[in-house]
Structure formats: C-alpha cells, structure tokens
Amino acid sequence: MEKNVNAIMPGLCARVVVEVGDKVTKGQEVAVINCMKTEFSVASEYDGIVKEVLSKEWDELQVGNPIVILEVER
Amino acid sequence: MINRLLIANRGEIVARIIRTCKELGIYTVAVYSEADQHAPYLEQADDAVLIGPSNPMQSYLNIEALIQAAQRTEVDAVHPGYGFLSERGAFAEAVEQAGLIWVGPSSTVLKAISSKCYCRHIADGVQVPVIPGTLNPVADGGSVVAYGRDRGWPIFLKLDKGGGGKGIEIVNNESEAEEVLQRASRIGQMAFGSGDCYIEQVVEHPRHIEVQFLADKHGNCVCLGERECSVQRRHQKIIEEAPSVVVTDEDRQRLFERARNIVLKIGYEGAGTIENLRSADGNYYFMEINARLQVEHPVTEYLTGVDIVKWQLLIASDEEINFSQADVKMDGHAIEARVYAEDPETFVPSPGTITRLRLPETGTHLRIDHALKENGSVPPFYDPLLAKVIAWGSERAEACNRLIEALADFQIEGIKTTIPVNLAILKRPEYLAGQIDTGFIDNNFLV
C-alpha cells in the first residue's frame, strides 16, 4: 500500500534526498525543508520503496503537503 | 541628490528607510513578492512593484527583476537594506551598470571584502590585531593538523566567503581535521561558490563589540560609537546595546582608530560596521566588516542622534560628512530586543497569521521598528525577525527597565514569538550585571 511522507513545517523544499526506486527505512531523512532560513529534516515514518517524488527544490510547502509517496508492505 | 529611491528589501527595514526618505523629500518605490502583497509598509511607499513569486530566489534575490523594477519606475538610486543582496558585489555592479546610484560601498569594494582573508590581510597590514589564525586559506587537511599540533585544539575552520553565522566548523582534534575541512569546503562550494577555509583559534568567552562608522567620498571617516551584541543564538544577535559596559574610553578611542585605519585603507564609502571580538582578558580582535546598514543601527541612532539612513543617502549623493569625531556625542544608554517569530524555548520558527496585535506606546524613550499588522501574515519563506523594540535611558538600568516594560506590553497572538525569552534575558541577574558573552543563551537558556 501507499504511504506519504509529508511536510512537517511550512516553507520551501530545500532538497529531496531520495529518488524513485530507493529503499528507505523508518527514521531515514527523505527531504529537507527551509522554514524561515532554518533547515528541517523530514524523515520517513515507514520502511518502503520510493514510488514517486512530488516535490523539488524551491517548491512551496504547507504542513501536510506530500513530498514523496512510498510503497509500503502491509 | 537622490530623488527617487527603490528599496530592494522587505519587512521592517523598508518602513525604516521610507521614514527618512519622507523627511528628505525622496520618492520611494517598494518591491514585494507574492507572499508580501498585503504587507503594511507597501502603503507607506509612493509606489510598490511586484517582483516575483514568494520564493526569494525569484524575487528579493533576483537581480534582473529588481533592475527591471528600478528602470520601470525610473528611480535614480537603489537601497539594498540588509540581508538578501545587500552585500552582493554582483548586484551593486548591476545597479551601477544600469546608471543608477548604489547606496553602499562600490561593487569593487564589496567584491574585495567578501573575502574574509582579504579583510584579515588589510587589518594586519594596518597593525590591527585579527583573531589569531591563518591570514590565507589552508591548502589541505595536513596544514590544519600541523597548525593544531603547533597551537593546540580545538580550532575553528571558517569559510573565506561565509557569512550570516554560516560556514563555521569546529575541529576538536587532528583525527577529524580532514573530514571537517572536506565538509566545510563542500558547504562553502554549494552556498557561497568557494570552498576556501582559513583557521581561527578559539577566543574564550568572547564578547561581540562592533563599531559603527560613516565614511564619505571625500576622505572623512567618523565613528558613531560601539554596540555590544554578545547575546546571540545560533550566531545571530537577539539583544544589542550601546555603550558596552566593558569598553573603556581608552578602548573606545583605540577601536575608533583601528576602524578608521581599516576603512580608509579599503576605500570604503558609506555606512558600515567593524565587528570585533573581545577576549575575557580584555584584548580586541578584528573579526569582519559588515558592508551594509545593520539591523541594530537604531541603538546607535538613539545614543548619537545621527540618522544613519539619512547619511547613507547623503554619502551616496556625494555629500560630505559635516561633523567631526569630536562632534559625536554619546548620550545615555540604549538597548534593542529583536522579536523573532520563533518558539521561545526551542527557537523553532513560527510562521503564520497574527490574529491580535497591540503595540506598546512609543515616544522619546521607546522606538519600535516593525512591519506588523493585525491579521497580517508572517510568511515561512524569509527571516523570522518581526520587530525591534529599542529603549533609551539616562543609564543602563533605566533603559533595561523601560525595555522590559515595553516587551511586557507587547501583545501579539497567532504566532509564537521570542518575547518571553527576551524578557527572561533582560531580567537575568548576570545580564543586569553586564556579565555576558556569546555563550550566554546556550549556557543559560538552552539546556
């Protein structure tokens, strides 16, 4: 099934550090958000495979906006 | 004299610059990104131009968009404010090449002093002590190890082109020297286009003491006193004051002399600041030059009665400074508290919408520089500075008490602010006793 990794802060997407097909583990950093000039690491809450990357550098993000979609085993 | 001025910035500093322009009869053009389209200061400007999306890379950091706005509104000068492109030689050059007046030191000077090693050489050349370390960038990890073996650990690696508290890495022992140098170089390459690092030794319990100066195009340079900015978090200032409780008259004269020597050697024209560190044993070391109007300039304006923005505009218009060092009077004491949109305990940013706003009453002893309004938004894309509250007193305790009273009266809801920590600092016995250094917040508030 699919699970999203969402923005935890509003701001700009500083970078997404995973690519489609990458295996990620729970707690692993998948993206960095720049909020008011401070960078915040966004970690995955699941083990899974990156299915889709929805954000890119400089995209505006609101809290809860999906950044990547993971394929997660049930 | 400048007739029409574009202000290439956002927030409180735009309102601040407009205030002086109104007094001088200068027509003002403000610029804004989509996120700032309802900002209150836009109404104070004579004209306001949309320059791009919220992302600062496409708006406030977009040289092309700013030059186009300047040409479209037929201004004859550009004031860069602070932060953003204010110290960027390439922006100053673009302004100059468009045939406009740049309010600040020339692009040639800005490009030269963007190298901290260049500034260290200049200071050293006019017999001003710099923070002990290397004058040139280090060649490799081996030379970092050699330096540390000779002088002891830890040491700092600083990026030659770094700034804004970024690009400072500590090396605790020789085994991590290579790795830290690689990391710092990589960050420098990405953020500042240069990976060059030089070495600075650790100054124990340093106090941050800076000298405000004005230098015109006729060889005059006048110092407007010092400011102490030792209370910082993440290498960024939060409480600033003037005068400093530790700077003696003798120290002050020596710091002024040093500042003048550096400024004249560089050929710097405009307002600027020489930042120094003062070690616990009372030695002063040159740190860097801030080639812009500083956030904390109101503290100096309160003490001296000199309008620094006015002099920036006059100097840019080739006017000569019409007063001497002896004419500069420093009366009383002023303290500024920066109010940030941050959680007061963790300093995590807190953007959002201001649902309620009640500002304390300002007057002779209290000044508030801000760009706030009720129901106004604080976007997540820019610096978290919300307001600067500055109080004056005939002596330090009076200024401090007035500032405490004002901050306690400052009512803002909808976002978190640093007001509680501003108050806690000002009420701390160590602060009242003047026992502060740059580790004050880390040691007292971030447990």
Image (cartoon, coloured by chain):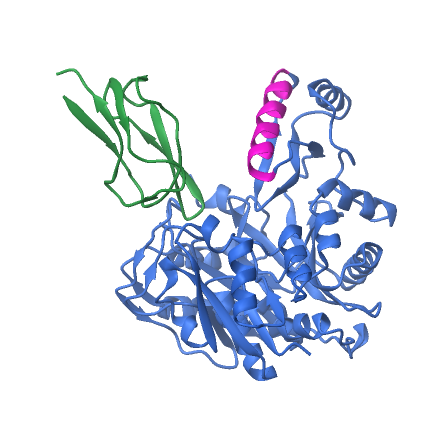
Chain colours: A green, B blue
- Can you say which quadrant of the picture contains the C terminus of chain B? top left
Q: Is residue B101 visible?
A: yes
Residue B197 coordinates in the image, percent (x, y): 68, 32
x 60%, y 66%: residue: B78
Q: Is residue B185 magenta?
A: yes
Residue A5 coordinates in the image, percent (x, y): 25, 31
On screen, B180 above or below B359?
above
On screen, A6 above or below B337?
above
Q: How many marks?
A: 0
x 35%, y 26%: residue: A29
x 65%, y 57%: residue: B92
x 60%, y 36%: residue: B168
Q: Is residue B357 magenta?
A: no
Residue A19 coordinates in the image, percent (x, y): 35, 23
Q: Is residue B287 visible?
A: no
Between residue B273 and residue B38, name the one nearer to us: B38
Residue B124: image quadrant is top right
Residue B261 coordinates in the image, percent (x, y): 84, 57
Between residue B346 and residue B271, name the one nearer to us: B271
| Segment colored magenta | B175-192
Between residue B288 and residue B137, name the one nearer to us: B137
- Can you say which quadrant of the picture contains the N terminus of chain B? bottom right
User: Is residue B432 left or right of B138 when viewed as pictured?
Assistant: left
User: Is residue B100 left or right of B385 when viewed as pictured?
Assistant: right
Q: Main secondary structure of the magenta part?
A: helix
User: Is residue B222 left or right of B37 when viewed as pictured?
Assistant: right
